[in-house]
Image (cartoon, rainbow, N blue to C red):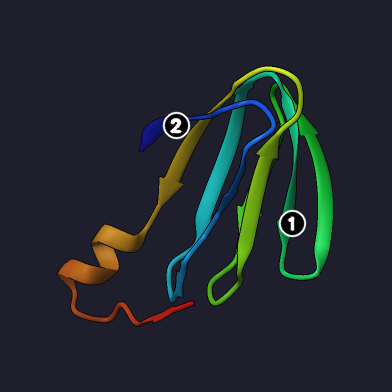
Amino acid sequence: MCVNSIPSWTKVGVETVGTWIIIFMVKAREGTSTIGEKTIDWSENDTLNVPHWTWASHQAMSDDADLFIATDREVQERLNVAREETA
């Protein structure tokens, strides 16, 4: 698990998709995410899930947003079962 900050009004995209899932827990601020073809507004204490093989992008709205990020990517890589596709 790690903490990432999304600078305000900056769009952050996922350039690689794979067999792992990603869970975002919003620690502070608000923003919007496009996960697959669905756009979701989020704010403090919300949780988002990016399923495997799904493209996603995220954007903080007014101030830098702080997100906890959890993924099973490393586990899948160590088990040699992770697969990925790059944009």
| Residue 76 position (above or below residue 32) | below
Identify the residue shown where x is 61% and y is 69%: 55
- Label 1 residue SS: strand
Q: Residue at x 74, y 56 (%)?
A: 34
**18 above or below 27?**
below
Q: Name above or below for residue 81 compared with residue 59.
A: below
Q: Quadrant of residue 36?
A: bottom right
Residue that badge 2 annotates: 4
Instruction: Identify the mark at residue 34; answer none if there is no mark.
Output: 1
Q: Position of residue 6 (x, y in %)?
A: 55, 32
Q: Is residue 87 left or right of residue 47?
A: left
- Please rate how many residues cluster around mark 1, counting C-alpha atoms within 10 Å: few if below 14, some from 14 to 19, many from 20: some
Q: Nearer the viewer, residue 75 or 87?
A: 87
Dividing the picture into quadrants, the one containing residue 67 is top right
Check the image and name the residue furthest to the front.
9
Which labelled disc corresponds to residue 10? none
Q: Secondary structure at mark 2?
A: strand
Residue 13 x, y percent position in the rendering: 56, 55
Of residues 25 and 10, the one nearer the viewer is 10
**Which residue is found at the position 57% from the left and 41% from the top?**
24
**Mark 2 belongs to which amino acid?**
Asn
Report the number of discs.
Answer: 2
Q: Earlier in the sequence, mark 2 or mark 1?
A: 2
